[in-house]
């Protein structure tokens, strides 16, 4: 009993922070989503309007486009590019060619540069790189004759999403790559040797031996990348301000615009609850996979 009391007292501060910073704001936000709370009339408070915010949200054509931008462009395409490049870079860094020329450590060190760069700094630097007037990409492509005129990567609807995904990938790819590299190094050498004895070439060994061993880490990284990307605000807002117009508007920027530009706090709260519900779904999948994996390791 004394041990249980001691453990309880140790957990009290944790429970306090969970309730104060997570549970209470969530309940408050849920309540606000059923009101017409307005930023410019906070003292007056909001009137109860039931599900009107949710009904207006789902029938709003802008919400459909915002949901498409968030789920397809920002999350699906962004995560796919990150995971694919992460796997390829992990194989490259772990290759015998880099070991032969003693370049493995150099490549690993190079990965730390974008990872150590703050998101705000990364976006500012990339805005300069992609600038149509002074950006180095336009400069060299014009000099080499690839382009006849500069491209405004962050304001042209044909290039803006690939540009945003490039910025996000550059800043977040190192963590994905290093995670896969650690998984790659944990593949039992006996399995690789056995595949070689059976006549498998390097490509077949990678597909049938190494990749299956990496599946758990790949699934976990896909889910974690989905969490980070779906809720992303900084990269999209600083890169384009949800523009041109509202072309790159995503759910995180829509919450901000509705709450602090239009002043519709109730509507913004409803949108936030929808975002939280979607992330809860992925969270349940993530926890089930983690619990299942831990049980396998124990038994």
Image (cartoon, rainbow, N blue to C red):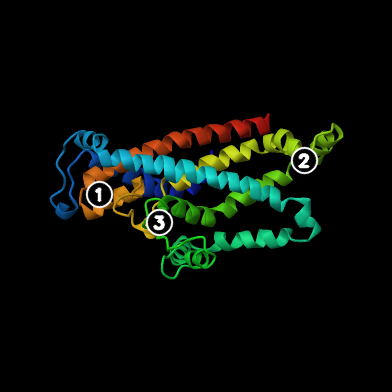
Gap in angstroms between the C-alphas marked 2 and 1 = 53 Å
The mark nearer the N terminus, 2 or 3, is 2
Name the residue carrying label 1: 258
Name the residue carrying label 2: 202
Front disc: 2 or 3 = 2
How packed mark 2 is, by other alpha carbons closer than 10 Å (few <14, some 14-19, many 20 or more), is few
Towards the viewer: 39 or 170: 170
Q: Which numbered disc covers residue 217?
A: none
Q: Which numbered disc covers residue 234?
A: 3
Q: Secondary structure at mark 3?
A: helix
The mark nearer the N terminus, 2 or 1, is 2
Residue 213 place in picture, x, y as percent: 69, 36
Gap in angstroms between the C-alphas marked 1 and 3 = 17 Å
Image quadrant in which you'd find residue 188: top right
- Quadrant assignment for the C terminus: top right
Q: Is residue 85 visible?
A: yes
Towards the viewer: 31 or 254: 254
How packed mark 1 is, by other alpha carbons closer than 10 Å (few <14, some 14-19, many 20 or more), is some
- Callouts 2 and 1 close, C-beta under 8 Å: no
In the displayed structure image, the side of residue 202 where residue 233 appears, left or right = left
Gap in angstroms between the C-alphas marked 2 and 3 = 41 Å
Q: Is residue 27 visible?
A: no
């Amino acid at each position: 009993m004394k041990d249980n009391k001691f453990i309880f007292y140790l957990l009290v501060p944790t429970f306090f922070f969970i309730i104060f910073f997570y549970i209470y704001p969530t309940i408050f936000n849920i309540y606000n989503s059923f009101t017409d709370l307005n930023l410019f009339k906070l003292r007056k408070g909001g009137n109860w309007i039931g599900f009107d915010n949710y009904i207006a949200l789902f029938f709003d054509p802008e919400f459909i486009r915002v949901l498409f931008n968030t789920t397809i462009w920002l999350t699906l395409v962004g995560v796919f590019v990150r995971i694919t490049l992460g796997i390829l870079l992990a194989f490259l860094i772990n290759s015998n060619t880099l070991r032969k020329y003693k370049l493995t450590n150099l490549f690993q060190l190079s990965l730390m540069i974008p990872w150590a760069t703050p998101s705000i700094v990364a976006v500012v630097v990339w805005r300069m790189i992609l600038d149509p007037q002074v950006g180095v990409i336009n400069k060299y492509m014009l000099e080499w004759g690839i382009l006849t005129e500069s491209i405004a990567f962050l304001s042209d609807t044909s290039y803006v999403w690939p540009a945003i995904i490039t910025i996000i990938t550059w800043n977040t790819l190192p963590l994905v790559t290093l995670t896969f590299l650690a998984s790659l190094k944990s593949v039992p050498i006996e399995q690789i040797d056995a595949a070689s004895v059976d006549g498998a070439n390097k490509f077949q060994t990678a597909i049938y031996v190494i990749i299956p061993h990496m599946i758990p880490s790949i699934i976990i990284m896909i889910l974690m990348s989905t969490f980070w990307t779906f809720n992303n605000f900084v990269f999209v807002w600083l890169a384009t301000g949800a523009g041109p117009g509202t072309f790159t508007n995503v759910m995180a920027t829509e919450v901000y615009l509705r709450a602090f530009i239009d002043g519709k706090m109730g509507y913004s709260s409803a949108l936030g609850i929808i975002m939280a519900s979607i992330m809860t779904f992925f969270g349940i999948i993530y926890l089930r996979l983690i619990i299942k994996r831990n049980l396998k390791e124990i038994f």
